Amino acid sequence: MINFNVPPFTGKEMEYVMQAVQNQKICGDGSFTKQCSEWLEEKTGTKKCLLTTSCTHALEMSALLAGIQPGDEVIMPSYTFVSTADAFVLRGAKVVFVDIRPDTMNIDENLIEAAVTDRTKAIAPVHYAGVACEMDKIMEIARKHKLFVIEDAAQGMLATYKGRPLGAIGDFGCYSFHETKNFSMGEGGALLIQDEQYIEDAEIFREKGTDRSKYYRGQVDKYRWMSYGSSYLPSDMNAAYLWAQLELAEEITKARLDRWQQYHEGLKPLQERGLLELPFVPKECVHNGHMYYAKAKNLEERTALIDYLKENGVLSVFHYVPLHSAPAGLKFGRFHGEDKYTTTESERLFRLPMYYTLKEEEAAYCIEKVKEFYRV
Ligand SMILES: *Cc1c(COP(=O)(O)O)cnc(C)c1O
C-alpha cells in the first residue's frame, strides 16, 4: 500500500527533542524555537517570524493584528481549508468568496476588486499546492483600497513568486508545520511579519496578552497584562522536531520536486490525449513540490479512478469541498460573482501520494496505475 502522506522524518528529530528535554526548557520560546524562527527570518527576509501552535493560529493572530471587527469583510477563495475563513469569522467578519482560476486553483486576481466594499478589510490569498497567487495584482488592489494582505502560505514554504518567498509578500504570512506539510513539527505553524510596527502587538497576542516576551529579553522587569490575547506559542520540543527538518530543507524540497517532476512527465501522455488535466505553474512561480494533483473529466470519473487506485494499493485523495456551500459558509460567507470554476474544478481534482520519502519506483507504480485506469 502506498500511503497518500507520510510525515516528514529526517533522522535527527529524536536527538533534538531529547536535547530540548535535557535543556529543561520544554515550554515555548526555548533555544530550538529561536533557531527555527531565525532561520525562517533569514530564508524569507522578513522582519519577524513567530512560531505558532498551527497555521490556523498564525491566521488568527493576523486577524487580531489587522484589527478585524464584527461586520468587516475579508476576501478569499472558497476553494481552501476551513482555517483561512475561521480566523476571520472568529472576529465576527463576513467572508466574501470569489472564484478561482482553473489553471492554478488559486483565487482569480481579476475578480477581487469587484468584490471590494467599504467594509472590506483584508484579502487572504491562498497559495494552493505551493504555487503562488498573482501577488503583484493582489498587492496593487490592496494598496489602492488600503486593505491588509494576509497570505495563507500553509503549503507555500520555500516557494517563490518573482523571486520573493511566499508568506513574505503580504503584510502577514502564515505557514503550517502540520504533519501533512513539507516540513513538520506535528502540529505547528509560523507567522511572518513584514512591518516592524506589528511586532510588539504580535508578541503580546501570542503570550496571553502579556509583555512576557519583553520580560524574557530583559526589557521590562516584570510582565503585565497588556491586552487580550491567547496562547499561540508551541512547546520547544515541537520546535526541536522541526529544526531537524529545517536543517535538511533543501534536500526535502528537492526530493519532493523530483517526484513531482516524475509524475508530471509520466502523466503527460494522458494530458496530450485530453484524458487528464495536469497542474500549471506560471513562469513567475517556483513551487516547492508540496502536492501533485491532476483533474479527471468529472466527479464520476474521479471517484472511479480513486477507487481503482485504492484497489491497486495506491491511496489517492480528493481535496477541499468549497467553503461557500458548506453549512458554515452559508452562514458566515457569501460568494461574490459567479461560481464558474470553484465547484466544478474541485470535483474533478485528485491528489497522488507525495512525501519526502516517497520512492521513485513507488511514484512510477502510481503513474502506471493511473495509465492503466485510462487504458493508456
Ligand atoms: C494545512 C492548511 C492550513 C491549516 O494548517 P494548520 O497548521 O493545520 O492549522 C490552513 N490553510 C491551508 C491552505 C492549509 O493547507
Image: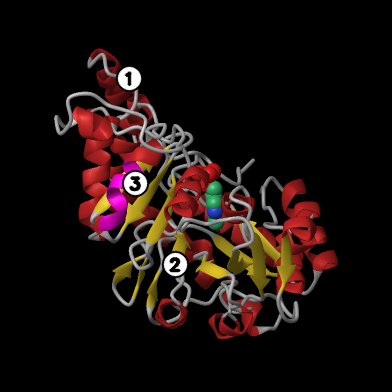
The answer for how far apart the CA atoms under marks 2 and 1 are is: 35 Å
Q: Residue at x 29, y 73 (%)?
A: 163
Residue 238: x and y in percent read: 38, 29
Whether residue 325 appears in this view of the structure is yes
How are the colours assigned in the image? secondary structure
Q: Which residue is mark 2?
A: 148
Find residue 26 and name its label. Answer: 1
Does the magenta-highlighted stretch encompass residue 365? no
The answer for how far apart the CA atoms under marks 1 and 3 are is: 24 Å
Whether residue 322 appears in this view of the structure is no
Q: Residue at x 81, y 59 (%)?
A: 303
Find residue 201 and name its label. Answer: 3
Q: Say which quarter of the image contains residue 256.
A: bottom left
The answer for how far apart the CA atoms under marks 2 and 3 are is: 16 Å
Q: Residue at x 27, y 18 (%)?
A: 25
Question: What segment is highlighted magenta in the picture?
Answer: 197-203
Q: Quadrant of the N terminus?
A: top right
Disc number lying in front (2 or 3): 3
Q: Is residue 122 above or below residue 291?
A: below
Q: Earlier in the sequence, mark 2 or mark 1?
A: 1
Residue that extends furthest to the left in the rendered view of this protein: 218
